[in-house]
Image (spheres, helix red, strand yellow):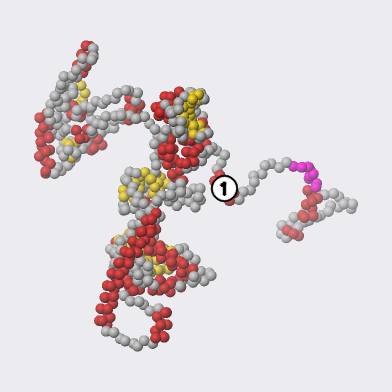
Amino acid sequence: PDITRPLAAQTIQYPCKMTSGGHNMLTTRAQSSPNTLSELPFFDEVWEMGPVKPYKTKAEKRRDKIRGSAKQTEDTVKLFQLLDVDLPANVGELQRQDPTLKGWFQKVMEVDGNRHSTTGFLDEATYVVKKGILYQRKGDVESLALPQQFRERVMDLGHTVPWAGHMGFHKTLCRISRRFVWPGMYIQISNFCKSCVKCQLTSGKKISQAQLQPLPIIGTPFERIGMDVVGPLERSSAGNKYILVICDYATRYPEVFPLRCVKARNVANCLIQLFSRVGIPKEVLTDCGTNFMSKLLKQVYKLLGVKGIKTTPYHPQTDGLVERYNQTLKNMLRKFVSTTGADWDQWLPYLLFAYREVPQASTGFSPFELLYGRQVGGPLDLLKDYWEHPESAEDNIVAYVVKMRQRLKEMTAWVQENMKTAQQNQKRWYDRKSTERVLKPGQQVLLLLPTSDNKLFAKWHGPYEVMRQVGKVTYELFMPDRVKKHQTFHVNLLKEFQVHQTPVQQLLICNIQDEEVKEKFLPSSETQFRAIDLSHLLVPQQEEVAALLDPTLFSEAPGFTDLVQHEICLKKDAPARQKSYRIPERLVPDLKKKINFMLELGIIEISTSEWCSPVVLVPKKDGSLRFCIDFRYLNSLSQFDAYPMPRIDDLLERVGGARHITTLDLSKGYWQVALAKELIK
């Protein structure tokens, strides 16, 4: 076909039957389609279609993702592992060997249907034995007395597996007590449910709030200001989308700045404008927004001598004055903006005047009165003056200033009293459902942070370690999984993490005082050996023990061996020069005394070598000094010894089967091995 012609006007020649005149017939594409398809082979056959993947919307795909795949979950695998164990069939024998069930066996009233005793007949719970197995009977329910080696497994099956559903304590207790029972199960199941990790991470916020901590009352206007950002809002005709809100904590005087963006530079310019009118404050309270925590604002604070204070994360109540004003301002704007919402920034001056004119609840005066010492004129004052036609009376300027100062002084005292009363009322109302909560350093806690809008994914984070208490209700946490390891949070966002206590066998050890306290720099006296009674041993055994108990072997004074020598292999061309450390003058007499004593014992000798390792005197707990040498420089120049250090876990496995474990330590072993003669200079 001719591609230069319009597609609708093109005709295509298809193979078809000959006409009666012997000529081929030309048809258009639309006219030839039915005839052409009918000429194809297998036109009337029924074709088998392969499986077609159904189309799913994005919402259906999200739901399928939440439901999960066909793979086994961790809980399912755990359930199969719990069930796929070899359970002993002689549970009755295990019951009799269990010391916690001996008291119940003494209260048995019935054995295989035969009355055995009448003791405890009127008790709510009775104990019976059937086929050698002990049961507790309460009404029509007979619960098997469970030996203690299976209690942990039963609590796991009754709470953590999917068939148990991680339900609460009462439902878990009801589920287990219908089948099994044991002494103290109420407390054990309660602790098990409290220490369940998944329950703690996914439970709702049921922690009690800490008591209200009132902020200090500020008496000087614009000594402390609070700052926050409202938005993003509908873009106004001037291009503004945000409102920078600033409130004075002394007078409750608000100031707002409409902004196109809330970068640190814009915030700094607004602060400079405010400071030029009201003066430079001492403190600025903000949240943890990136624009408020920027380096630029910190530099501005440093240049102007302003102290920047930030609230704890996700606890805006610290800056409650500004947060409450934000809500009031947005409610006022809703009543005046147009349907498009593009004129909200034009109403801000009028709404600010409306808020500044009326008395504030905590102070009892309007912000205008506390800032200017008088009530400013408004529309209502103009109407009143128009009707009254007051006579103009000009006051003396000096008298007016004195009168205004006196009024400001009186109002300041009234404001202090009103604010104290308001804070007491707020604290009394807030503390009705609050308790005093104290966390200790090193304690494990969970942290509640808003991470997802999906209710299935919302959970607590942690556990994290409490490092220190910053304020009365704020704590610093160590968070190793985050970029900023140490962060401060309010106690209302924290709850104690319950660690599951697994029953273990008790091991009693002798508490030996740390050798740091007992250590003596040099022997003070000779050890007095006493005769040891070995009459309980045979004569050959007594001779062997006597040969081991050599008085010189267990002497406090260090010995000396010539069997081995210590060699130090230095790297090639290693420099030897190193400066000694300066010793404080008050420690020099003790240093000389220790050096002279070691010279007398032959432990050290005078040397003229160019090698020098500094002396370090370390104070001990008893007030004395430990004589140490800093060999770090020498070690850095020594060849590396690849001999592996023994592992603690290997040593524990090696001696784990022993009945008695003891240790032997050389008395100042580093003095008993001499340095090789060729290395002494």
| Rendering quarter of residue 574 | top left
Q: Which residues are magenta?
A: 38-47
| Rendering quarter of residue 531 | top left
Asked if residue 265 can be seen in this view, the reply is no
The amino acid beneath tag 1 is Arg
Where is residue 605 shown, x and y percent of the image? 12, 31
Question: Compared with residue 484, is residue 91 higher up or lower down, i.e. above or below?
Answer: above
Residue that numbered label 1 is attached to = 63
Question: Compared with residue 386, is residue 601 higher up or lower down, i.e. above or below?
Answer: above
Q: Residues within 10 Å of mark 1 (few under 14, many from 20)?
A: few
- Residue in view at x 50 percent, y 50 percent: 455
Seen from the viewer's position, the closer of residues 636 and 587 is 587
Q: Does residue 192 appear left or right of residue 556 in this picture?
A: right
- Residue in view at x 41 percent, y 85 percent: 386
Where is residue 610 shown, x and y percent of the image? 16, 36
The C terminus lies in which quarter of the figure?
A: top left
Q: Does residue 214 appear left or right of residue 450 in this picture?
A: left
Q: Does residue 589 appear left or right of residue 120 in this picture?
A: left
Where is residue 170 shown, x and y percent of the image? 47, 41
| Rendering quarter of residue 368 | bottom left
Asked if residue 456 can be seen in this view, the reply is yes
